[in-house]
Image (cartoon, rainbow, N blue to C red):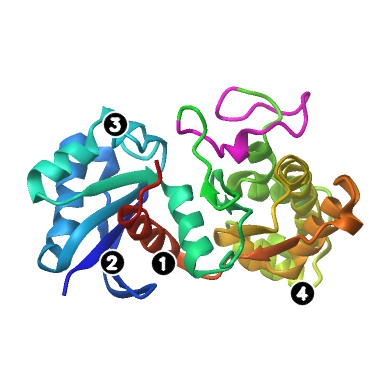
């Protein structure tokens, strides 16, 4: 029996798995080697595929960056050195003689959650990922939203403060500049200089450490998540007012913080959207964890999204 192979290409790892009935039945992972140049990274992708080639009828690949899904081209990927206008679909089809489709990694995560996870059964869904960067993707009236050029969903670079600090993208006041993992840690470090906090006992801080201390009642850690939740809520409010989704799914490591993150998000959204009392809206955590990208990529390979 042949299966669909889903591959999630991240900056650190390439995760691959074959899918049956909405479940990853066998997985494989290896280092990406994204900093070692184009050919080395392509070789890593081929190694992942060869682990499943005998059982595979089609290949779907999720990859961070600006992706031309229609033509199977990686226009640019921030995680992979030297990747500009790479015809990844063509390269892999020639090597393995199988159908190959590629899409943005957050779109892949959204498809996984929409079909098999937190967004199952809904026609209008928005998902965003919280990590070092902030990504977004949308299902509108049962269709994956690509946009005119295939680049829709850059949620992290929506503006929440026109006079805000500069983001790595070069613009000012981007949502990512306020809620990305590095800035969450930076905010905590600034706060503990002025206020007594249990965070001072750690040699280095991570979002998880800050979340754990917030759950224990630390004032600084709690305040950090209150601020982060507020800014995410502002961003989500814009999405809700624009697209009117049934569900907003939050994924990524920081989403594991739970109530201390979701309460300020929901409070802010309720205060900033039009007609909250008339909307059926849920803001919830993703369900599928690291398998979402694999599942979504595989689903994309099986369907026509043109």
The image position of residue 74, as x and y in percent, is 32, 34
Residue pointed to by mark 1: 291
Q: Quadrant of residue 57?
A: bottom left
Q: Would you name the residue on which mark 2 appears? A: 17
Q: Single out the mark in the foreground, 3 or 2.
A: 2
Instruction: Please give left or right for residue 133 compared with residue 179 in the image.
Output: left
Q: Position of residue 180 (x, y in %)?
A: 61, 45
Please give the count of numbered marks on the rendered protein.
4
Which quadrant is home to the N terminus?
bottom left
The region drawn magenta spans: 150-170
Q: Nearer the viewer, residue 221 or 260?
A: 260
Q: Is residue 166 magenta?
A: yes
Tag 1 near tag 4, CB within 8 Å: no
At x 82%, y 51%, the residue is 269
Q: Nearer the viewer, mark 1 or mark 3?
A: 1
- Dot 2 and dot 4 residues touching (CB under 8 Å): no
**Picture quadrant of residue 255:** bottom right
* Residue topped by disc 4: 216
Q: Vertically, is 154 above or below 164?
A: below
Kindly check if marks 1 and 2 are in contact, taking CB atoms under 8 A apart as contact. yes
């Amino acid at each position: 029996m042949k299966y669909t192979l889903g591959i999630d290409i991240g900056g650190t790892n390439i995760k691959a798995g074959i899918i049956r009935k909405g479940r990853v039945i066998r997985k494989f992972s290896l280092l990406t080697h994204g900093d070692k140049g184009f050919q080395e990274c392509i070789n890593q992708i081929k190694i992942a595929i060869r682990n499943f080639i005998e059982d595979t009828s089609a290949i779907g690949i999720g990859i961070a960056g600006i992706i031309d899904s229609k033509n199977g081209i990686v226009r640019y990927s921030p995680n992979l050195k030297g990747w500009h206008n790479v015809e990844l679909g063509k390269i892999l089809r020639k090597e393995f003689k199988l159908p190959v489709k590629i899409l943005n990694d957050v779109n892949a995560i959204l498809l996984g959650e929409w079909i098999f996870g937190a967004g199952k059964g809904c026609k209008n869904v928005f998902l965003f990922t919280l990590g070092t960067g902030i990504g977004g993707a949308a299902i509108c009236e049962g269709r994956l939203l690509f946009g005119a050029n295939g680049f829709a969903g850059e949620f992290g670079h929506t503006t929440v403060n026109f006079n805000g600090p500069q983001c790595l993208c070069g613009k000012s006041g981007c949502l990512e500049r306020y809620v990305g993992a590095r800035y969450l840690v930076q905010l905590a470090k600034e706060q503990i200089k002025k206020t007594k906090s249990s965070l001072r006992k750690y040699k280095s801080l991570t979002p998880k450490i800050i979340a754990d201390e917030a759950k224990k009642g630390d004032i600084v850690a709690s305040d950090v998540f209150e601020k982060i939740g507020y800014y995410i809520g502002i961003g989500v409010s814009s999405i809700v007012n624009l697209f009117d989704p049934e569900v907003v799914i939050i994924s990524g490591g920081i989403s594991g913080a739970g109530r201390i993150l979701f309460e300020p998000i929901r409070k802010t959204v309720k205060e900033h959207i039009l007609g909250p009392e008339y909307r059926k809206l849920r803001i919830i955590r993703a369900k599928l964890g690291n398998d979402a990208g694999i599942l979504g990529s595989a689903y994309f390979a099986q369907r026509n999204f043109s």
